């Protein structure tokens, strides 16, 4: 299958839910007079979530210097650990909780209705039951969304792998936002004439069995920003590569860890956007003014390529099938 190996990264397009406050009007805080304590609960450790946390911390450090302290905890992919961590934050009376990924935000929301919660790496706050609506959330939760540009990913598949007819999508059955993205991707791919099959895995142990079986039924895969899959890209990539099945994915770290290509948001910028929300809450107090974010109008998209390994690859039927040197795939080539 003729596929070019490249990675395209897009600065995040953010959909933000406002912070709703109860009670009296807050009094702005002078950051020179207070050291803010922020608890960060990250669902799992993989490049996307790591970058979001990094962006969040760097934005606030740039703004507050030594007037902010972070307590960063990883839940190692376990919901029960999220609950334990946020309960510790509540007991410590942190000034704000940053919850990285949907299940982390859920745990924080269940633990407190008083401490401000800023979420990131969440696809749909309303669908996940985190807020009443994006315009009027009615809770102590705000955040930045990592909704993926699925239509562009479909065009990417068509451009890089024109022979593909059937696309498989493997998701964690326990991640609501993965289900959202899978259904949106299914609709988008089917609209372009692809057949789509969705497969579910409950944990890491099921990935090898499910993906191996799926390779017998599909020509290629599309993987959304699913935390379980993102943390196990090498496992899935080893199987799909051996079977000659390209994988288009929803996030740059997944591509760099082994999948074929992506056209995706920057989780670092997503984290910085969440950091800006946190700064506004800490300094000005809730309610958070309407937050709208689009990336820089000058050049929101960037791309780079990387070649396949020189060793045998199922995508390389002959040396003539791949460019002799890395090539940049321009945005115009993949935009719908």
Image (cartoon, rainbow, N blue to C red):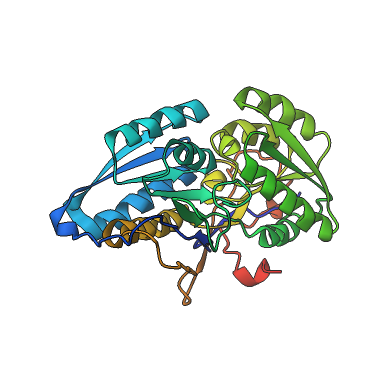
- Residue 26 horizontal/vertical position (percent): 30, 60
- Residue 117 horizontal/vertical position (percent): 41, 48
**Residue sitting farthest toward the bottom:** 298
Is residue 209 placed above or below 158 in the rendered structure? above
In this rendering, position of residue 110 left or right of residue 224: left
Residue 189 found in image quarter: bottom right
**Residue sitting farthest toward the left:** 33
Is residue 288 placed above or below 83 in the rendered structure? below
In this rendering, position of residue 310 left or right of residue 182: left
- Residue 181 horizontal/vertical position (percent): 67, 49
In this rendering, position of residue 35 left or right of residue 95: left
In this rendering, position of residue 199 left or right of residue 14: right
Query: Taking the image as drawn, is residue 2 in sight?
Result: no
Query: Taking the image as drawn, is residue 151 in sight?
Result: yes
**Residue, x 68% and y 30% (percent of image)?**
201
**Residue, x 41% and y 67% (percent of image)?**
289
Split into 4 quadrants, where in the image is the C terminus? bottom right
């Amino acid at each position: 299958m003729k596929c070019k190996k490249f990675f395209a990264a897009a600065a995040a397009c953010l959909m933000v839910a406002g912070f709703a406050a109860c009670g009296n009007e807050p009094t702005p805080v002078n950051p020179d007079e207070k050291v803010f304590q922020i608890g960060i609960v990250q669902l799992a450790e993989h490049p996307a979530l790591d970058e979001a946390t990094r962006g969040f911390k760097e934005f606030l450090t740039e703004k507050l210097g030594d007037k902010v302290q972070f307590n960063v905890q990883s839940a190692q992919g376990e919901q029960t650990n999220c609950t334990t961590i946020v309960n510790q934050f509540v007991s410590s009376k942190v000034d704000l909780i940053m919850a990285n990924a949907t299940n982390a935000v859920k745990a924080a929301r269940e633990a407190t209705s008083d401490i401000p919660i800023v979420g990131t790496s969440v696809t749909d706050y309303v669908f996940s039951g985190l807020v009443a609506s994006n315009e009027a959330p009615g809770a102590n939760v705000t955040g930045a969304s990592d909704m993926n540009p699925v239509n562009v990913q479909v065009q990417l598949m068509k451009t890089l792998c024109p022979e593909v007819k059937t696309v498989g999508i493997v998701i964690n059955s326990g991640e609501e936002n993965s289900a959202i993205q899978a259904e949106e991707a299914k609709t988008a791919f089917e609209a372009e004439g692809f057949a789509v099959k969705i497969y579910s895995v409950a944990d890491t142990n099921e990935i090898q069995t499910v993906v191996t079986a799926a390779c017998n039924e599909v020509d290629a895969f599309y993987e959304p920003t699913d935390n379980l899959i993102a943390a196990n890209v090498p496992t899935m990539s080893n199987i799909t590569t051996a079977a000659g099945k390209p994988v288009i994915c929803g996030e740059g770290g997944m591509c760099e860890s082994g999948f074929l290509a992506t056209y995706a948001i920057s989780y670092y910028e997503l984290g910085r956007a969440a950091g800006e929300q946190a700064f506004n809450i800490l300094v000005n107090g809730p309610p958070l003014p309407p937050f709208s974010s689009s990336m820089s109008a000058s050049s929101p998209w960037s791309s780079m390529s990387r070649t396949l390994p020189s060793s045998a690859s199922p995508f390389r039927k002959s040396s003539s099938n791949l460019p002799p040197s890395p090539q940049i795939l321009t945005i115009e080539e993949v935009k719908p």
